[in-house]
Amino acid sequence: MLIHIEPLDCGVFLPAFVIGYAVEDDDELESLDAPPLIVALDQQAGGSRMQYPSMIGALIRLEQNRERGLRDLGMLVQGFRAMAEEPDLALLERDYAVLRALVQTKGAPYTPEELHSLERYLADYLTLPPAARGIEACVQFADCDPRALFAHWNVMSCTLRGEDRRRGSIYRSADGEYHIDESNLEDVTLEDKVPLEDKAWSELERLRQLLRRPRPPQLFLLWENSD
């Protein structure tokens, strides 16, 4: 069962890294047999001129891996959450000047200067490759080996509850798919117990073969959009 997640307003999925692939055509996910460690993300991004990038892969939630950064990630998580819908601009202006400059945009790609400022800010917390491109709430990094950076970080597992314990989805799902958004979070069980270097990486390798992608998984950073 492939779980599709719309994380906006859910408050539990993001901020997070996604290790996987951008989805350019939904047809490539049709009838895809995905384990709980692999999810599809239907992200809302771009500030007030919204865009909808989608990706599939392993989700590494920052809150559930707070102790695995160069320092505790709690402050960083708080900053990204302050950028979410109806952002806390007062908090951002006081404690997160870099993040404040990256919120409430109008859909334009981040400039090289904005990406560099984000890189420098994140470097206090994490070892990451350069940011290659991005818009508000969705940044893609340069090619890297995610295992070298996140081997011991735990991947989120998303398991669908039994049919008699679900509220149901507002979306009409194809066979083998189920959509999760803020309205039916109770339909899934979330756990963060499997490190990337373990079974999760094997599942990513399998995903690469199923999607017939020539390149290794890419690294994305997502947070909730401001609009």
Image: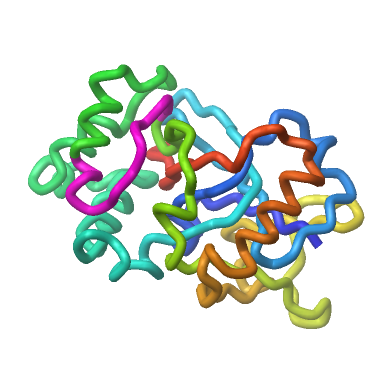
Q: Is residue 127 left or right of residue 4?
A: left
Q: Which residues are magenta?
A: 121-135
- Picture quarter containing residue 72? bottom left
Specify the color scheme: rainbow
Q: Is residue 161 above or below residue 101?
A: below
Is residue 174 highlighted in magenta? no
Is residue 15 visible in the rendered image? The answer is no
Q: Position of residue 100 (x, y in %)?
A: 21, 36
Q: Residue at x 42, y 40 (%)?
A: 225
Q: Position of residue 183 (x, y in %)?
A: 62, 61
Is residue 41 visible in the rendered image? The answer is yes
Q: Position of residue 48 (x, y in %)?
A: 42, 27
Q: Residue at x 46, y 34 (%)?
A: 140
Q: Nearer the viewer, residue 154 or 26?
A: 154
Q: Residue at x 40, y 53 (%)?
A: 149
Q: Is residue 103 left or right of residue 109?
A: left
Q: Nearer the viewer, residue 156 or 44?
A: 156
- Picture quarter containing residue 180? bottom right
Q: Residue at x 19, y 62 (%)?
A: 71
Q: Nearer the viewer, residue 225 or 22?
A: 22
Q: Is residue 56 above or below residue 160?
A: above
Total marks placed = 0
Picture quarter with the N terminus: bottom right
- Picture quarter containing residue 59? bottom right
Q: Position of residue 160 (x, y in %)?
A: 73, 72
Is residue 129 highlighted in magenta? yes
Q: Is residue 93 left or right of residue 126?
A: left
Picture quarter with the C terminus: top left
Q: Is residue 104 left or right of residue 224?
A: left
